[in-house]
Amino acid sequence: MSRLSILFLSVALFSSCKQSSLNIISENSSKICMHGYFPTGQSVKETLAGLGLDLRDAQFIDEPPGKLKKLRFNIEKTIPGYQKIEISLKYEKSLFSSQRKWKNSDVKEAIVTKIKFIN
């Protein structure tokens, strides 16, 4: 593929990313929209490493209470044009906690089903 083709593909992916919520991952979070679609079935640990995010910075979203569904991060300082990113999780029994306190190891092993960028 020529450099010009790669440039056009990158611009198209970036434009699509700005217009809708895509499942995307990148090794460099500042260029997240230019690296293609997010591969399904990846662990939270792999996803966070690819996005340059730390689980300690996550807001845990549980609905109903105790059933962990999403992780939310503030990214306004790292990815221009976006304020937050939400990572949806495939539910497993290990993601339920009546005290709403989840083990980091269980969360890191969870499978990511969707990534949503919020303006």
Image (tube, rainbow, N blue to C red):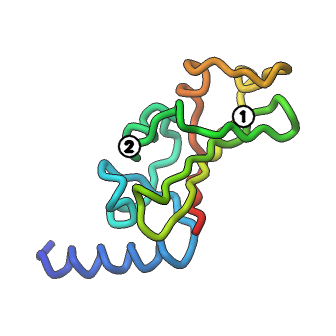
Residue position for label 2:
52
On residue 33, which mark appears?
Answer: none
Quarter-of-image position of residue 1: bottom left
Residue on which the image places disc 1: 91
Residue type, mark 1 in image: Tyr
Q: Up-down: is 12 above or below 85?
A: below
- Residue 27 relative to residue 20: left or right: left
- Name of the residue lying farthest toward the left: 2
Q: Is residue 27 above or below residue 34?
A: above
Q: Earlier in the sequence, mark 1 or mark 2?
A: 2
Extreme front residue here? 77
Residue 74 in the image: above or below residue 34: above
Identify the residue at horizontal 42%, vertical 79% (top origin).
15
Q: How many C-alpha atoms fall within 10 Å of the one at disc 1: few (<14), some, or many (≥20)?
A: some
Could you tell whether 86 is left or right of 97 in the image? Answer: left
Choose top left, top right, bottom left or bottom right for residue 112. top right
Residue located at (55% from left, 51% from top): 74
User: Considering depth in this image, is 117 or 90 the residue closer to the camera?
Assistant: 117
Rendering coords of residue 77 (x, y %): 43, 57
The x and y percentages for residue 89 are 65, 40
Q: Which residue is at 78% across, 38% downward?
A: 62
Disc 2 element: loop
Residue 119, how many percent across, how many down? 58, 69
- Judged from the image, the secondary structure of the residue bearing numbered disc 1 is loop
| Residue 36 quadrant | bottom left
Q: Amino acid at mark 2?
A: Gly
Provide residue 81's location: percent of width, then percent of height.
47, 70
60 to the left or right of 77: right
Distance between the Cα atoms at labels 1 and 2? 23 Å
Q: Nearer the viewer, mark 1 or mark 2?
A: 2
Q: Residue at x 86, y 34 (%)?
A: 65
